[in-house]
Image (cartoon, rainbow, N blue to C red):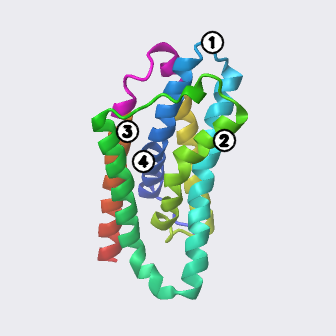
């Protein structure tokens, strides 16, 4: 049974925003290093990030459901796992943002397809853990959540590329701080909801 509520949609959008911050930071760097980037190239870069951000939660969700079928007691650990993973990821982003640890990869200047794929994987690997946080969704809801994350990521990355072309990477650290805070809040919310049943 599908239960798409405002809270579900809002959580999906917030997950998308939180997870897209790494991709946003990389998009800023890409935009900074290619001020003549055309719209088609921007769409390809944002599209790659969006696809990875949508695929990773679905891979995580599939893994969780494969495991849960055999070990039903594992389900009780999901809120704890979600809390630990999102606190770790969010905390790491927060620390990087506070330290100002945003390095512009030299490979960004001549962004090949291979380099773009590596960026896509590197910025979305954290999204794998979202499979744990959305484990209580059925397949259709998980897919809708992943698609919302993809749309949000695409929009944020396009915005990042545009800003990067005009401003540079000065606000990338703030993006990491915002992303970290959002992921920590979602982790706590999922944990509390899981404990309260």
Residue underneath mark 3 = 176
3 vs 4, front mark? 3
Is 172 covered by the magenta stretch?
Answer: yes
Is 124 covered by the magenta stretch?
Answer: no
Q: On the rendered structure, is 10 left or right of 162?
A: left
2 vs 3, front mark? 2
Q: Residue at x 35, y 32 (%)?
A: 173
Residue underneath mark 2 = 117
Q: Residue at x 66, y 41 (%)?
A: 117
Label whose residue precedes the other's in the sequence (1 or 4): 4
> Callout 2: 10 Å neighbours few (<14), some, many (20+)?
some
Q: Are marks 2 and 3 in contact (CB under 8 Å)?
A: no
Instruction: Report the quarter where the C terminus lies.
Output: bottom left
Residue 8 x/y as whole percent: 46, 57
- Disc 1 is placed on an element classified as loop
2 vs 1, front mark? 2
- Can you say whether 157 is above or below 10 in the image? above
Task: Report the span colored magenta.
Answer: 159-174
């Amino acid at each position: 049974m599908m239960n798409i509520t405002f809270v579900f949609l809002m959580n999906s959008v917030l997950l998308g925003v939180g997870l897209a911050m790494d991709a946003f930071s990389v998009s800023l760097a890409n935009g900074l290093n290619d001020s003549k980037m055309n719209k088609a190239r921007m769409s390809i870069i944002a599209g790659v990030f969006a696809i990875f951000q949508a695929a990773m939660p679905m891979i995580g969700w599939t893994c969780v459901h494969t495991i849960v079928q055999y070990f039903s007691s594992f389900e009780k650990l999901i809120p704890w796992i979600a809390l630990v993973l999102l606190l770790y990821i969010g905390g790491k982003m927060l620390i990087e943002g506070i330290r100002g640890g945003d390095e512009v990869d030299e490979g960004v200047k001549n962004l090949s397809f291979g380099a773009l794929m590596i960026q896509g994987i590197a910025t979305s690997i954290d999204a794998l853990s979202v499979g744990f946080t959305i484990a209580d969704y059925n397949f259709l809801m998980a897919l809708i959540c992943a698609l919302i994350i993809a749309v949000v990521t695409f929009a944020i990355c396009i915005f990042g590329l545009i800003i990067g072309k005009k401003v540079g990477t000065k606000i990338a650290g703030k993006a990491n701080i915002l992303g970290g805070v959002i992921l920590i809040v979602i982790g706590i919310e999922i944990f509390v909801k899981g404990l309260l049943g």
